[in-house]
Image: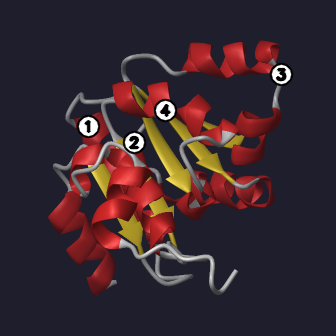
């Protein structure tokens, strides 16, 4: 598809990427192609693919269908990251080596920096050689949703290290409509 090729052309050398495309527009295909490109250029050696538990089987099927490279991919539910005990977390942490790319499908689930999921992902994302986020609905509640996802890639995208700086600069906060 032309829009998929356009995204691939634009992002093929980016080590941080976001694919905010409509549902069924081919985000996963583009992300897999980008990952295979990074693997072919020796930038990564493995992939941790994070998605909602309900999407794990689909992610595995699409990875098998679209991957044109021999990179190993571990698919883990986002709910597992936020809800697992230390033993499982250590197991996943051992998978995340210095050559491990991380892809977060349905990245709108990254709600805020204080959430357990965000805290557990933080170190992995900072140290990963390649990070991608995918969503068909990046803003589910308000513009803060977009900030949190962008910050997971790199705080410099918006230029604020925390949500409070972002809010002070761009939002008018009120409890009038709560």
Pointer 2 or 3: first along the chain: 2
User: Do the numbered discs 2 and 3 sit on residues whose CB atoms are within 8 Å?
Assistant: no
The figure's colour scheme reads secondary structure
Question: Would you name the residue on which mark 2 appears?
Answer: 69
User: Element type at marker 3?
Assistant: loop
Question: Would you name the residue on which mark 3 appears?
Answer: 85
What's the CA distance linking mark 4 and mark 3? 17 Å
- Side of 81 relative to 139 (left or right): right
Q: Evaluate whether residue 31 shows in this view.
A: no
What's the CA distance linking mark 2 and mark 3? 33 Å
Question: Would you name the residue on which mark 4 appears?
Answer: 122
Question: Would you name the residue on which mark 1 appears?
Answer: 40
Of residues 60 and 116, which is closer to you in this image? 116
Residue at x 23%, y 28% (from the top left corner): 42
Where, quadrant-wise, is the N terminus in this rendering?
Answer: bottom left
Pointer 2 or 4: first along the chain: 2
Q: Position of residue 62 (x, y in %)?
A: 59, 60
Pointer 1 or 3: first along the chain: 1
Pointer 2 or 1: first along the chain: 1
Of residues 127 and 69, which is closer to you in this image? 127
Q: Residues within 10 Å of mark 4 (few under 14, many from 20)?
A: some
Q: Residues within 10 Å of mark 3 (few under 14, many from 20)?
A: few
Q: Evaluate whether residue 151 shows in this view.
A: yes
User: Do the numbered discs 2 and 1 sit on residues whose CB atoms are within 8 Å?
Assistant: yes
Where, quadrant-wise, is the C terminus in this rendering?
Answer: bottom right
Q: Residues within 10 Å of mark 1 (few under 14, many from 20)?
A: some
- Side of 166 relative to 112 (left or right): left
Residue at x 47%, y 27% (from the top left corner): 124
Q: Which numbered disc, 2 or 4, marks the residue closer to the eye?
A: 4
């Amino acid at each position: 598809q032309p829009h998929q090729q356009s995204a691939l052309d634009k992002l093929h050398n980016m080590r941080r990427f976001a694919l905010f495309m409509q549902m069924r527009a081919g985000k996963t295909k583009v992300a897999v192609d980008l990952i295979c490109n990074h693997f072919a250029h020796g930038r990564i050696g493995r992939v941790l693919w994070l998605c909602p538990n309900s999407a794990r089987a689909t992610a595995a099927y699409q990875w098998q269908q679209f991957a044109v490279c021999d990179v190993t991919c571990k698919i883990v539910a986002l709910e597992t990251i936020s809800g697992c005990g230390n033993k499982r977390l250590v197991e996943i942490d051992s998978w995340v080596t210095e050559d491990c790319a991380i892809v977060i499908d349905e990245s709108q689930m990254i709600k805020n920096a204080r959430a357990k999921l965000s805290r557990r992902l933080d170190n992995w994302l900072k140290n990963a050689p390649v990070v991608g986020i995918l969503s068909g609905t990046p803003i589910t509640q308000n513009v803060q949703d977009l900030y949190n996802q962008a910050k997971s890639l790199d705080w410099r995208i918006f230029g604020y290290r925390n949500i409070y700086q972002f809010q002070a600069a761009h939002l008018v906060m009120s409890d009038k409509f709560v």
